[in-house]
Amino acid sequence: MPEATEHPDNSDSSCLFCRWIRARKAVETLGTVAAFNDGYPVTDGHLLIAPLRHTPDWFSMTSKELRDSDTLIRALVERIRPRDPLVTGFNIGTNIGASAGQTVFHAHIHLIPRRDGDTANPKGGVRGVIDGKREYHPF
């Protein structure tokens, strides 16, 4: 992986992720983005991929930040799979706005490794963010 990019000047001192970037808490960096361990992981290995510059959400990320995020996510997945053979799937997602559950207003993407049996019924996946909407019967 390339060397860590220096922290950009446009940070927000009140932002948790900007503080993590300044403190060099990233587990990996690539170009304009960094990966961090989630402070409240859903599963073992739950990571957050965030731009090094302060920007509020996924829609405000630059094309370069989005490309770097995609490249870093793919590299992390390729590293996780051989290290943990129990990982059989992943959820990748982002919360945009308070009504969607965003609590840190610095753009970030969740990479959540999944294992068989980590929930009783994973059918519906991310649909579960709305109570009662996870299970559905399309067929």
Image: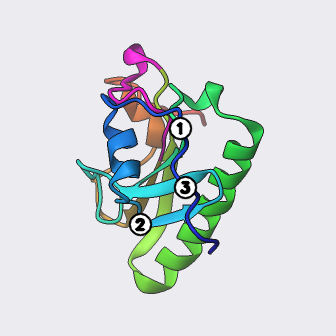
Question: How far is the residue under mark 3 from the one under mark 2?
Answer: 15 Å
Residue at the spot x=57%, y=52% of the render?
A: 33
Q: Identify the residue position indicated by label 2 in the image.
A: 27
Q: Position of residue 55 (x, y in %)?
A: 54, 29
Secondary structure category for the residue under label 3: loop
Depth order, front residue of 137/70: 70
Q: Amino acid at mark 1?
A: Asp
Stretch in magenta: 97-109
The quadrant holding residue 84 is bottom left
* Residue located farthest toward the front when viewing the structure as drawn: 9
Quadrant where the image shows the N terminus: bottom right
Q: Identify the residue position indicated by label 1 in the image.
A: 9
Magenta-span inclusion, residue 7: no
Residue at the spot x=71%, y=35% of the render?
A: 62
Q: Main secondary structure of the magenta part?
A: loop
Res 124 visible: no
Q: Identify the residue position indicated by label 3 in the image.
A: 6
Check the image and report above or below for 49 versus 11.
below
